Image (cartoon, rainbow, N blue to C red):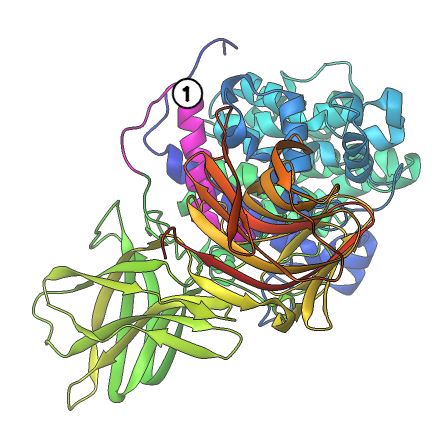
Amino acid sequence: MSKNSIFPISPDYRDRVYAGWLGKCIGVHFGGPLESWSYQDIRDNLGAVEGYLQPPGKVFKPDDDLVMPLIMMRALEDSPDPGRLTAQEIGTTWLNYLSQERGAIWRGGYGVSSEHTAYLNLLHDIPAPQSGSAALNGQTVAEQIGGQIFSDIWGLVYPNDPPRAADLAEKATSISHDGEGINGGRFVAALVSAAFSESDPEDLIETALTVIPPDSEYARVVRAMVAWHAQQPGNWRAAREYVEREWGYSRYLGIVPIIPNAAVIVLALLYGGGDFSRSIQIANMCGWDTDCNVGNVGAVLGVAVGLEGIPEHWRVPLNDLIVSSSIIGGRNIADIPATADFLSRKGRILAGETFTDAALPRYNFDYPGSTHGLLVEKRRCRVALLQQSTEWAFCGRGSLRVTIDRLNRKGEVRLFTRTHYRVDELSSNHYEACFSPRIYPGQRVTVQVYLPAGAPGIVHTSLFVRDRVRNLAHQSPGTKLLPGQWNQLSLALPAMEDVCLSEVGLVVRSLGEDPWSGVLHVDALDWDGPPNYNVQLGTLLPNGKTTTGWTTHCGYWRVENGAYSGSGGGQNESYTGDVAWQDYQITVQLQPVLGERHCVNVRVQGALSSYAAGLVAGERVALCKKQEGHYRELASAPFPWRHGELYTLTIVASGNAISLSANGKQLLQVTDGHAPYSHGQIGLSNGAGCHTRFLNLQVAALGA
């Protein structure tokens, strides 16, 4: 394979990417509950581990094995030239999407956790790859497992091109690792890339070996496992004991050395024989860093065997849903098909393809078996089942088939997706996920519903959203479905106050005298438009260690004494909203308590990029632009503000123009002519040694 060649994208590329990411998610969920268990403990206490062990009724916790790939893949979107992506750019992605104080990575301490060490280095202006180098951090930290656990995605965007996949993985891995850690990143990315055209585990391993130094310890371990398997192909437990003798944890310093876990990955691939279930089961029963190893094996086998090779019992409990923990709270409910869409689109761009087609709706049910995380509830109805189908499609290749049996006139079926979670709904929250709603008042929801020809004209449907705060549903008028055609439903959400919209979906009712049984198809569920809502910030509810609807980057944020208060020793910032919002206005009532900087942020694209406007030192107001994490004043004006007084600030973002009004009088307007931010969330912020009470917030469309 020539490093300079770009292989054509195969017709099944999208489905293979979905299968690979799905396999990764299955593996992490399957392996997560056994993380840090020893092989002996699993063998003696559990025996054969063949299915999920997570607690029933809970959403699986955020896991760094999934969170960090979800974060790092954003570098492909944020870079002006993703085909030439650098380690420094991916390091910037870390800084932009990770909170300083919680979430995403294992924060085990400097010199203990490789990722935490690297992140602190980046924060202190030590760039990649020096941030992850052995010269700086020592060999033990540099050669832990993180080098390989986040690298599957680079193989997904470079199908059938292991050298390019490995090169990109090396850049990403070098942020936090070196030496054998980098070899692990290269090896795993190459395995995934090669799996697009090869399914035999031995051939996959041989291909992946070509991208790492043959004299490395990593290569020697891989070849030793291949040789052992050739001699004893029928006993994986004997192979696991061989790994323990030769490369057990006791031979290495550090918490999670890469080499023993690399041996487990190769062992599972070889002894699994190309079977998805058997491979991830063996990887899990081997112990050590199970979520990592099983996730890597699941990604490789997912691509290799495709969707048809992943048994349904692995997919159903997952329901196409994972939870993340970046500071962009609206992205922390991450359905698997949407991630596959993102990665496959980036892969096609890297392969030289251009796009004239519009992106598919959020919920397009295009992949075989996909559900996009939709749920169903029924009342006075015997059966209500959801299943992806290719029988009918409004856009793309499929839709969601809803099978209903004996729906009573006084009953209903609700199918919906979650747009916000409480952290107590998660199986645990070690990586401290926090959520901003994915949908807001003022936006418009649309969906397409198909009722087959010949069905009776008694089926009515409505769109709805649910407010978590009051547990109230806001619902559109019922629409009688016309059989034999697609029916569009639309719901324009009105302005609302003090809400947190946690569900959006469809209500199905029958108006017939007798119970109705039949099917309908749902497709193209989506929403967009500017927000329009008001929040008394002192009424916000707690959600774990954060506040409902908000994420935090730095500082101490809490609801106390009738306000949302922020204080701390750095750039203290808290965010909400949707990063896709473009033009809007935000009005905030605030009270400066201490310090010389009290601001409102707009067009927030992460911790490094936003506009801020507010009260600053010298009895002034200022409008600033944050670039690479540093604020620069664009304009200022005299304004004799005082601590303890209440002020109402309004910031308008329209195109590349930003304006600031204080107490109803416009004081500043700036047109940003240099790489303006065209979209982003909203936020509240202050400076080091500051304390601000934020009392009320209103967001609206321009002119509303």
Give the side of residue 610 with respect to residue 384, left or right: right
Q: Which residue lies at the image location 55% right of the left edge and 35% below the top edge?
A: 74
Q: Is residue 222 above or below residue 17?
A: above
Q: Nearer the viewer, residue 437 or 54?
A: 437
Q: Is residue 657 above or below residue 289?
A: above
Q: Position of residue 402 (x, y in %)?
A: 29, 67
Q: Position of residue 41 (x, y in %)?
A: 82, 58
Q: Which residue lies at the image location 57% right of the left edge and 72% below the top edge?
A: 57
Tell whether position 340 is magenta: yes
Tell whether position 295 is magenta: no
Q: Which residue lies at the image location 62% right of the left edge and 16% below the top edge?
A: 210
Q: Position of residue 291 (x, y in %)?
A: 68, 49
- Which residue is the site of mark 1? 351
Q: Nearer the viewer, residue 651 or 412?
A: 651
Q: Position of residue 86 (x, y in %)?
A: 62, 20
The part of the chain drawn in magenta is 330-358
Asked if residue 453 can be seen in this view, the reply is yes
What quarter of the picture does the C terminus occupy?
Answer: bottom left
Q: Secondary structure at mark 1?
A: loop
